[in-house]
Every structure is written in structure tokens, then in C-alpha cells.
Image: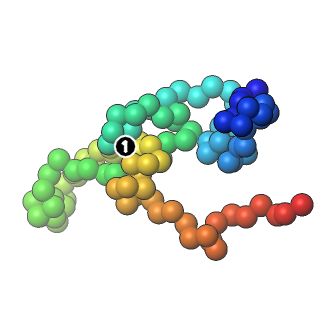
Amino acid sequence: MATNQGGITGPLAKKRKSSGRAKGGSGHKGAVQCSRCGRLVPSDKAKKFTKAVSAVEPQIARELRQQGSYIPVHRVTSYYCISCAVHSGKMNIREHSERKTVPSR
């Protein structure tokens, strides 16, 4: 039980049923590090972005492809905490009308 400033004890309000995570009932999940700020975030809560990166410049790669050569592409995965993903523009906060609403009882 937590005590708020009025001295009343009771459970604190919970903003989300899932606590902003996607783990369901699977128990403890491992943590990943935010690529921007270094914060440790649960892997099911972090926002994952995968980008294909080539070691060859685009102009040279185009010429090599026309000649029939294969250019390997590496996938780079970066994880962001929610605050960094919003701040860097990777994801947007939905408008109030577009948010998922809970039916009133």
C-alpha cells in the first residue's frame, strides 16, 4: 500500500492496464539499452527500428548493380526508450480523438 500526501493509504492509480508493455503473462523480459540516451528499457517496452545499411556509397552501388555484382546490406537495429522516440520524431503522440478509448462503465 502506498501513502499519498493526504495520509490516506490505498492502491495508487494505474495509467495503463499493460503498464505500456507487450509482455502479457510471460514474466520477466530482458532489458535493452536506448541507442540515444543509454537508458535501460525492457525489451517489450522499447521501440525497435531496423535500418538497412550498405558499406558502399549509393552512386557506386548503382554502377556495380548494373554490372551484375551483389552488394551485401547489413541490418542495424536500434532501440529507443519512449521519451527518446517521441523527441527524435521516430513516433508521434496520437491526438486525443485518435487514441484508444476505454468504454465507460
Q: Is residue 76 left or right of residue 60?
A: right
Residue 5: x and y, percent? 66, 36
Whether residue 64 can be seen here: no
Give the position of the C terminus as an image quadrant.
bottom right
Q: Classify 68 as above or below 39.
A: below
Whether residue 37 can be seen here: yes
Towards the viewer: 69 or 36: 36
**Res 94 quadrant in image:** bottom right
Q: Is residue 100 left or right of residue 42?
A: right
Q: At 31% from the left edge and 51% from the top edge, which residue is drawn? A: 52
The outermost residue toward the front is 6
Residue 84: x and y, percent? 39, 48
Q: At 47% from the left edge and 63% from the top edge, which residue is drawn? A: 92
**Res 64 quadrant in image:** bottom left
**Would you call the spot at circle 1 few (<14 residues within 10 Å), some (14-19), or many (20 or more)?**
some
Q: At 44% from the left edge and 43% from the top edge, which residue is drawn? A: 81
Q: At 77% from the left edge and 61% from the top edge, which residue is drawn? A: 102
The outermost residue toward the right is 105
Towards the viewer: 25 or 81: 81
Q: Is residue 33 left or right of residue 9?
A: left
**Res 32 quadrant in image:** top left
Residue 86: x and y, percent? 42, 56
Q: Amino acid at mark 1?
A: Ser
The outermost residue toward the bottom is 97
Q: Is residue 81 left or right of residue 4?
A: left
Q: Classify 32 as above or below 96.
A: above
Q: Classify 76 as above or below 87.
A: above
Provide the residue designation for mark 1. 78
Give the position of the N terminus as an image quadrant.
top right
Which scheme is used to colour this image of the protein? Answer: rainbow
Helix, strand or loop status at disc 1: strand
- Marks counted in the figure total 1
